[in-house]
Amino acid sequence: MKRTLMAGGLLLVMTGVAAAQDAPVIDVLKQATCGCCGGWVEAMRKAGFTLNVRNVSGEELYAAKEASGFSDDLWACHTATVAGYTVEGHVPAREISRLLEERPAGLGIATPGMPTGSPGMEYGNEREAFDVVFVNLDRGQQIYASYPGN
């Protein structure tokens, strides 16, 4: 009985490790001096994501934003990629998980600007209403999720 429980527990641990190793890594480009980008990175790590973070020049960050196919009205302070999608700005972990689960045909998702209360932009209990925008393959946009303000 004891061996069966230990083997079952080991199998669960190994399955969890395999699942974590199979999870896509989020590659993040940000500038070293941006504190709110660091806050977003920390929020994503707390949510269970593995991140590869690179501090880059403003020119390199701008080039990545242009290459994403996202219009500049969607840009924020950092740009990330995961599983072939772009994740622009302070997107909540819940929407990244949803994107990776649903795998819709598109370029990715963005939280335009830097709304107070979004991950990395927390200041007390204040929260601006904000949207997460999905960018289609033809660069059209639609609301992917909405977050209320207070």
Image (tube, helix red, strand yellow):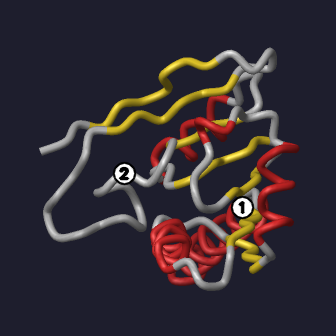
Q: Nearer the viewer, residue 82 or 37?
A: 37
Quarter of the image for residue 117 reads: bottom left
Residue 84 sits above or below residue 54 on the image: above
Residue 133 sits above or below residue 89 on the image: above
Residue beneath disc 2: 115
Q: Nearer the viewer, residue 105 or 77?
A: 77
The three-letter amino acid code for the residue at tag 1 is Ile
Callout 1: 10 Å neighbours few (<14), some, many (20+)? many
Residue 119 sits above or below residue 86 on the image: below
- Residue 25 left/right relative to 113: right
Residue beneath disc 1: 26
The three-letter amino acid code for the residue at tag 2 is Pro
Q: Nearer the viewer, mark 1 or mark 2?
A: 2
Residue 100 percent coordinates (x, y): 66, 41
Question: Residue at 80% of width from left, 75% of height from top?
Answer: 57
Callout 2: 10 Å neighbours few (<14), some, many (20+)? many
Question: Residue at 80% of width from left, 15% of height from top?
Answer: 138
Residue 107 sits above or below residue 15 on the image: above
Which secondary structure, mark 1?
strand
The mark nearer the N terminus, 1 or 2, is 1
Question: Residue at 68% of width from left, 15% of height from top?
Answer: 140
Quadrant where the C terminus sits is: top left
